[in-house]
């Protein structure tokens, strides 16, 4: 019998989950709709679709600078709106997975699209602006997004949450994580029923149970699409006795998992409301009367500059 060489003797990952197996797939293999592509080491990336992420890395510098200037005007209007309402303001930009891990992509990527880099450079003097991309060192970037996901892991979201608290002048918590678990990928839907999974860790800090004890979801509004959806929570167990209003997208989501930013804000703040919207709406601020207003978007959406 031929004795094949053993490349690695560490098969513990497969022994722990014998129901899963690994297969070799060529780098550059795309989903049938061409939206998702395999990169190095099994990392999946969004690269086409309506936002054409691949093409955004090739944006000419003059176009990037012009769009960044428009965004700067929008952010200044948001700051003025918040100041007039007497509330703290924070703007968060979540990076593309490919901007965190350009070395893993099968297409030309970089540490930020030209537009993302231009916008962050223009906002460097504003403490209310968070480029989430710069929060992760090289090792952390590998786990900020699970291998087969298009959204951040619980680790990635807690790092963004900690940064938000620090920028707001609040004490960020120290969060511990338990052993890895297996969870279905959110990019699997692009592969015609074939399921992919991630090995991800979830938080197990004891204070989470304490801060979850009094949490109540008090507002649920579902629209036909994502925009216009709302979630609201009341939490007398929360350590921060403030009211937060967030405008954002699927990185806040509906608060059902620590992979969502809403999950963290709902547990640490006495009142929290999330509106799925790319715009800041002054009427909502007037109606809710928050102490803090947060706007959040993702790098891929930046070419569509918001007016307010």
Image (cartoon, grey):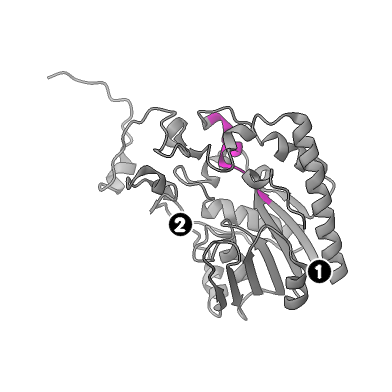
Q: Mark 2 points at which residue?
A: 178
Would residue 115 be found to the left or right of residue 187 on screen? right
Residue extending farthest left = 1
Local secondary structure at mark 1: loop
Expressed as whole percent of the image width and height from the top left, the position of residue 62 reads 78, 31
Question: Toward the viewer: 14 or 291?
Answer: 291
> Which image quarter is the C terminus in?
bottom right
Would residue 300 be found to the left or right of residue 145 on screen? right
Q: Mark 1 points at which residue?
A: 87
**Lower position in the chain sequence, tag 1 or tag 2:** 1
Asked whether residue 28 is in view, the answer is yes
Task: Please tell me whether residue 259 is drawn above or below residue 235 in the rendered image.
Answer: above
Question: Toward the viewer: 293 or 29?
Answer: 29
Marks 1 and 2, Cα distance to the nearest angstrom?
36 Å
Give me the residue at 80% from left, 38% from top: 66
Local secondary structure at mark 2: loop
Q: Residues within 10 Å of mark 1 (few under 14, many from 20)?
A: some
Question: Toward the viewer: 66 or 198?
Answer: 66
Give me the residue at 56% from left, 69% from top: 207
| Marks 1 and 2 close (CB-CB < 8 Å) | no
Expressed as whole percent of the image width and height from the top left, the position of residue 131 reads 70, 47
Q: Is residue 99 magenta?
A: yes
Give me the residue at 25% from left, 48% from top: 19
Which region is colored magenta? 93-103
> Which image quarter is the N terminus in?
top left
Q: Is residue 158 magenta?
A: no
Quadrant position of residue 63:
top right
Expressed as whole percent of the image width and height from the top left, the position of residue 277 reads 65, 61
Task: Please tell me whether residue 240 is drawn above or below residue 74 in the rendered image.
Answer: below
């Amino acid at each position: 019998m031929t004795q094949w060489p053993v490349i690695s003797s560490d098969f513990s990952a497969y022994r722990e989950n014998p129901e899963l197996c690994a297969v070799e797939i060529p780098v550059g293999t795309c989903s049938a709709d061409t939206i998702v592509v395999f990169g190095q080491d099994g990392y999946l990336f969004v690269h086409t679709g309506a936002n054409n992420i691949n093409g955004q890395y090739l944006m000419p510098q003059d176009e990037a600078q012009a769009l960044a200037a428009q965004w700067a005007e929008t952010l200044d209007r948001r700051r003025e709106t918040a100041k007039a309402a007497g509330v703290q303001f924070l703007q968060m930009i979540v990076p593309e997975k490919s901007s965190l891990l350009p070395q893993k992509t099968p297409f030309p990527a970089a540490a930020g699209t030209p537009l993302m880099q231009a916008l962050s450079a223009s906002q460097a003097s504003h403490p209310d602006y968070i480029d989430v991309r710069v929060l992760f060192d090289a090792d952390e970037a590998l786990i900020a997004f699970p291998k087969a996901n298009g959204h951040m892991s619980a680790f990635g979201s807690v790092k963004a949450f900690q940064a938000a608290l620090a920028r707001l002048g609040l004490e960020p918590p120290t969060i511990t994580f338990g052993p890895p678990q297996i969870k279905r990928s959110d990019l699997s839907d692009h592969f015609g029923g074939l399921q992919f999974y991630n090995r991800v860790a979830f938080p197990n800090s004891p204070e989470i149970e304490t801060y979850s004890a009094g949490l109540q979801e008090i507002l649920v509004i579902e629209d036909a699409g994502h925009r216009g959806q709302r979630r609201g929570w009341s939490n007398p167990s929360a350590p921060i006795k403030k009211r937060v209003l967030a405008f954002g997208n699927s990185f806040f989501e509906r608060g059902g998992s620590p992979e969502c930013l809403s999950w963290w804000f709902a547990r640490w703040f006495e009142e929290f409301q999330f509106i799925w919207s790319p715009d800041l709406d002054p009427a909502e601020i007037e109606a809710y009367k928050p102490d803090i207003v947060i706007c959040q978007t993702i790098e891929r959406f930046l070419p569509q500059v918001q007016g307010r």
